[in-house]
Amino acid sequence: MSYTPEEYAAAAARATAEQKELLIVGGELVLQEPAPRPLAELRQEAAATLWANYKRHQQQYVDAEDLTLATVCAASGSAKGAAVQAWVMNLWANYYQVKDAIESAADADALAAVVLTPDPENIPPYTIRELNEEAAAVLAAQNNQEG
């Protein structure tokens, strides 16, 4: 049987909407479940998604320069700097726990159950603005002592 371009396009759109493969079998258009993807491929995709999600979450609050500021403040005895630095370290410790869960998932269902996003309620205890203000106050105090 021959299909018009419109009939084929409609069948292809339905296949896409239902996430199925469109095949021609014996001259008939047939929608079929796609072949399962290999677990290794699913793990690789999950790990990439996990990395992107955690990196985006960290950078939403603390980018590389901010982390440097937190580290310098912490080294100078700042409790706020140490707390922000600890937040980043804890975020990535959680990332590695989730990554281990990805790697140990026994099948696609177990892998699908792994949550690939950090808790949106997990935010740093202090803002970068607060760290900047604290660093400015420390610098001003040092300048006053030297002057």
Image: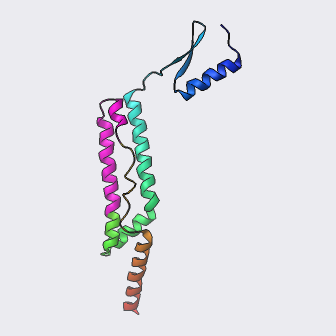
Position of residue 28 measured from the top left corner of the image (x, y, whole percent): 59, 10
Residue 47 x, y percent position in the rendering = 39, 41
Q: Judge whether residue 137 is colored magenta.
A: no
Residue 63 visible: no
Q: In which quarter of the image is the N terminus?
A: top right
From this view, report whether residue 67 is shown above or below residue 4. below
Q: In this view, does 139 lie to the left or right of 32?
A: left
In this view, the residue in front, 44 or 147, is 44
96 magenta-colored: yes
Q: Where is residue 76 in the image (x, y as percent from the top left)?
A: 32, 75
Residue at image x 43%, y 69%?
Answer: 128
Q: How is the image coloured?
A: rainbow
Q: Give the range drawn in magenta.
A: 86-114
Looking at the image, the residue that sits furthest to the bottom is 147
Residue 87 in which image quadrant: bottom left
Indicate whether 91 appears above or below 138.
above
Q: Position of residue 92 (x, y in %)?
A: 34, 53
| Quadrant holding the C terminus | bottom left
